[in-house]
Image (tube, rainbow, N blue to C red):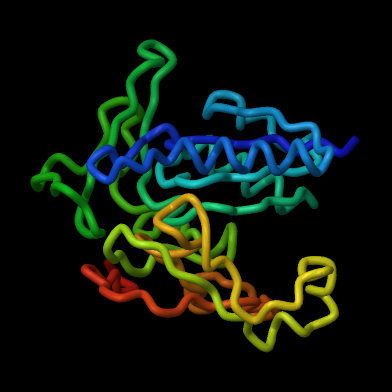
């Protein structure tokens, strides 16, 4: 039985005012792995440091906050031939810090830019727990496009929409992904407000690290309102 290790960090957060907890998506994806006869282990941030030997990893729902160690472990796993399924959105956005001395504490400093609920003041950009520079991973020289091909680019209302299949889906390299699926419209249903896309949107950007040979398989449509755009230098 193939082993898929679920790397979960930040996925326990919930949008309570929408009464739509993110945890439902994690549970649904775990069930999907079980139905496909994959051994599935749920990992927290402390366990990601030994990811390299695994057959694959799936990051679900909301992998927004990562430490240098967890991001490096994922990157080294991919670079050494491991497989990574990034099934969430707004991933690898903020650099966070932890400490073995106070393991239940996570430090976030929202330095300089980015879409955020609050902004750190000048002089508060460096993290106390590890001394590193806080803020976006992109501003720390590690855009998410380098690891998984896409990165956060816009935020809308908490509504769901769908994807439309793109020409890249016809490439023979993608045949295994669409085996048994002939639909042009994908994901126009689901737990999160009735669609597979929406709220926080990622995009490919070849200047930020999306591989030049990457396939764009599908693109979201009918997002009714974008409340915040995240330009390249945010």
Q: Which residue is farthest right?
A: 1
Residue 123, image x, y percentages: 12, 42
Q: Quadrant of the N terminus?
A: top right
Q: Which residue is farthest top?
A: 101
Residue 184, image x, y percentages: 65, 81
165 on left or right of 107: right
Figure check: 140 above or below 124: below
The front one of 204 and 50 is 204
- Residue visible at 24% across and 58% down in the picture: 115
- Residue visible at 82% across and 69% down in the picture: 180
Q: Quadrant of the C terminus?
A: bottom left
Figure check: 10 above or below 59: above
Q: Which residue is farthest bottom?
A: 167
| Numbered circles on residues, count | 0
84 on left or right of 155: right
Residue 7, image x, y percentages: 60, 36
Q: Quadrant of residue 41?
A: top right
- Residue visible at 63% across and 84% down in the picture: 166
The front one of 226 and 68 is 226
4 on left or right of 104: right
Residue 122, image x, y percentages: 9, 47
Q: Quadrant of residue 131?
A: top left
């Amino acid at each position: 039985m193939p082993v898929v290790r679920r790397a979960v960090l930040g996925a326990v957060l919930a949008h309570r005012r929408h009464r739509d907890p993110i945890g439902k998506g994690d549970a649904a994806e775990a069930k999907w792995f079980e139905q496909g006869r994959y051994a599935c282990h749920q990992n927290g941030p402390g366990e990601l440091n030994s990811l390299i030997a695994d057959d694959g990893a799936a990051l679900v729902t909301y992998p927004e906050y990562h430490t240098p160690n967890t991001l490096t472990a994922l990157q080294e796993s991919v670079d050494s031939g491991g497989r990574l399924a990034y099934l969430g959105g707004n991933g690898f956005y903020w650099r966070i810090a932890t400490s073995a001395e106070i393991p239940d504490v996570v430090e976030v400093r929202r330095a300089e830019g980015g879409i955020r609920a609050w902004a750190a003041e000048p002089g508060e950009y460096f993290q106390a727990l590890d001394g590193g520079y806080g803020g976006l991973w992109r501003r720390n020289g590690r855009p998410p496009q380098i690891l998984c091909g896409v990165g956060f680019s816009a935020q809308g209302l908490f509504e769901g929409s769908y994807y439309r299949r793109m020409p890249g889906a016809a490439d023979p390299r993608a045949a295994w992904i669409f085996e048994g699926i002939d639909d042009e419209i994908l994901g126009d249903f689901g737990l999160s407000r009735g669609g597979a896309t929406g709220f926080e949107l990622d995009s490919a950007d070849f200047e930020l690290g999306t591989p030049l040979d990457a396939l764009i398989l599908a693109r979201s449509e009918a997002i009714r309102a974008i409340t915040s755009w995240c330009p390249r230098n945010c």
